[in-house]
Image: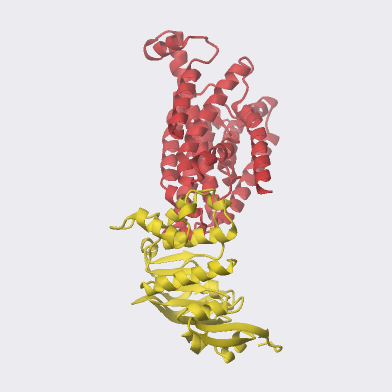
Chain colours: A red, B yellow
Amino acid sequence: MNLKLTLLIFLIALFIFSLSTGHTTTSFSQGITALYYGDGPLGTVMRQIRLPRAILAILVGASLGVCGAALQGYLRNPLAEPGLIGVSGSAALGAVISLQTGFATYVWMGLPIAAFSFATLAVLLLLLLAGPRGSSLTLILAGIAVSALAGAFTSLALNLSPNPYATSEIVFWLMGSLADRSFEHVWLALPFCVIGWLMIGSIGKALDALTLGEDVASSLSISLTKTKLLLVFGVASSVGAATAVCGAIGFVGLVVPHLLRPLVKGKPSTLILVSGLGGAVMVLAADIAVRVILPDRDLKLGVLMAIIGAPLFLHLIYKTRSALQ
Amino acid sequence: MTLLTLKDLSVRRGQCPVVDNVSLEIRSHELVGLVGPNGAGKTTLLKAALGLIEHSGDSSLAALPLNERSSTAAWMPQEREINWPISVLETVALGQLLPTKNLDKNQIINDALDRTGLINYRDRISTELSGGEQARVLLARALAQNTPLILADEPIAGLDPATQLTTMKMFADMAKEGKGVLISLHDLNLAATFCNKIIMLDRGRLYAIGDPAQTMTDENLEKVFNVRAYHARTDNGIICQPIEVLSHSN
């Protein structure tokens, strides 16, 4: 069957399953009825807790998948991921500072706004370091520098926490989660995610051309500067917004494009959409898993993702290594 | 018809000129061999002509708006880079990435596959082919761009003798059909046999330009390459086989 259609069917099935999963046990039909017509507690749970959570899982997963595929395509490196250019690390720093300073408590939506602002600042710093015309290698190096800087300041913020409660709040936030998110988070993230996807979607052809290297792409009338700007701002917009609302979720942007690449026969432009769907499926499935595995312990999505993602990644490296020998 | 004009083209790395005031023209029906020892500036000259690196002076190609370059000249770099496991057909089809007017894309792609003997390879994965086969795939990709001008940096390096001859013959045929082809190469013999014009570079400067008989002279080869060559004329063209390295350094 068509890969995109298969992933879409998976996604819809998981979306419905996600709506039926949680503390309040409910049958699927009861849940859907309550979603539309219920004005009791079940209706509130469905509309204000589970629906935004499932939508956010899709937004976050799709953003990570799309950006991972695009970055790997642009950098011609299967080990690239959205965290590489420092956007998620900087968004996390913004969130940590807002928690530390109380901005998150006193300002409406203070945390995601701070996180997103820092992601934007990170991109500006990145472009300042790498230059709009710099090669992909300078972009990686600048990204590592920005990530390291964000990581250092995040550690400083933790180090200077006024009390253990603030520290644990920051640490838990950094683990990444979709619990207790509302439609306000959805409305905040949605436009930026969609803008990011559109920007990245527009560079599909350029990524295909880059398969043969920057010089050939250039001779095919591809503007490398424009491609890089669209990529960087696209990643900043969608991953910045995703990290702002749910914390840093690792491995999705790395593993999903890697897993799906053989199924699209390697073509970078096709991989973008497929990887977006795959990322959404993965995050939605993981977010269901955190509620099913340890329903009473608030298992963090980012933690589960790392527990699943790291061994999967090791397996991929092992396979790649065997293929290269 | 003139397809490429370079006027006083120079490229500098710091204070050092890598390409120094080169002026030349490539016309249709010309297969031009760009020769010179390692470090003579062949690759740099080609890249500057394409507008891929910063330069001073004029290149008619680099002066074109970006969106017109892909329909004017195809470029095959020395680095044979295919980064993802895409099929031969997909790789070659990248030559038709941007829409061309009034032309049948599939026909052009099939012609390119046919010319390079890759018709039966179309569904193979490019990255799984041998180095020589990949070179042919990348050449087919450049041909699929269907441009009047083709620039290739050492397109026959690393190929077996039969493929080298077939490739040179193909370039010569394309020139006969009206295209302009500029290739850099180290094989002076193949350059002398197949090219109808030779550009000899020496330390970034244009040392000699003209037909092989005029340029591949003992004196020039001695001065530029520091070699002595065996010369002969055959029905197929000129033979120019370096046979001895001269003891003194030029």
Q: In front: A13, or A99?
A: A13
x, y percent for residue A128: 54, 55
**Is the N terminus of chain B in the top left, top right, bottom left or bottom right quadrant?**
bottom left
Q: In front: B156, or A149?
A: B156
Residue B242 shown left or right of residue B4 in the figure: right
**Which residue is depicted at the point 58% across and 34% down?**
A248
* Residue B154, image quadrant: bottom right
**Which residue is depicted at the point 60% across and 21% down?**
A290
Q: In front: B228, or A233?
A: B228
x, y percent for residue A169: 63, 26
**Up-down: is B169 above or below A273?**
below
**Which residue is depicted at the point 49% across and 54% down?**
A210
**Up-down: is A138 above or below B40?**
above
x, y percent for residue A195: 41, 40
Residue B185 shown left or right of residue A167 in the figure: left
**Up-down: is B208 above or below B115?**
below
**Which residue is depicted at the point 36% across and 53% down?**
B106
x, y percent for residue B199: 50, 81
**Is the C terminus of chain B in the top left, top right, bottom left or bottom right quadrant?**
bottom right
The answer to whether one can see residue A285 in this image is yes
Q: In front: A188, or B89?
A: B89
**Up-down: is A57 above or below B79?**
above
* Residue A250, image quadrant: top right
The answer to whether one can see residue A160 in this image is no
